[in-house]
Amino acid sequence: MTGPNVSCSELRDWVEAKISEVSRSLAGRTGSQAVCQIHKQGRVTGGLKYDEGQLVALNAVRRLLAGMAGPCSAEEIAAALEAERAKWESNLAGHQARERPALPWVAYYQGGLDAVTSALNVLTPAPESPPQAIPSLTG
């Protein structure tokens, strides 16, 4: 399913599967409580915020793909995903640059950035590196 020939429907399927996976992880972290209730109780963890960021970003990707009617090109999808990735990257950098960054929000934006980057990697995976020669130990 990877490479320049990934269709919108294949990427949509990947996004839906990833949303299900992250939703299960988030549910495991929250038990049966709502995220807002956990926030009010001050029991927010980086893992919870990371999953929450992933879920928000994946839903944004879902909306981007839903807005692409008819056949769409890998270039069109990649451009939309790059724009979404730039938003998450900018927000992450802004929080990291603060004198005292709020770690849960850093985790949130990192989760979102990682989710969009993963979607981009599904669409256009990085080329494999050629094997490196191992230097001789005998000289």
Image (cartoon, rainbow, N blue to C red):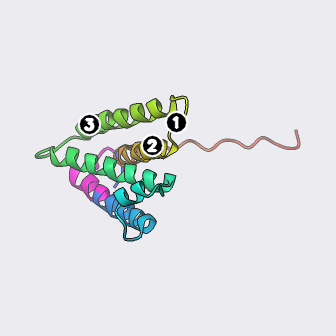
Q: Residue at 44% x, 58% y: name it.
A: 41
Q: Is residue 103 left or right of residue 122?
A: right
Kindly state the secondary structure of the residue where label 1 is placed: loop
Residue occupied by mark 2:
105
Query: Closer to us: mark 3 or mark 1?
Result: 1
- Marks 3/2 in contact by CB < 8 Å: the verdict is no
Task: Looking at the picture, tell me which residue is in the foreground, 70 or 47.
Answer: 47
Kindly state the secondary structure of the residue where label 3 is placed: helix
Q: Position of residue 85 (x, y in %)?
A: 36, 37
Q: Which mark is residue 80?
A: 3
Task: Looking at the picture, tell me which residue is in the foreground, 134 or 120.
Answer: 120
Residue at far right of view? 138
Kindly state the secondary structure of the residue where label 2 is placed: helix
User: Residue 64 lies in magenta, yes or no?
Assistant: no
Residue occupied by mark 1:
101
Labels 3 and 1: the sequence-earlier one: 3
Q: Is residue 82 left or right of residue 7?
A: right
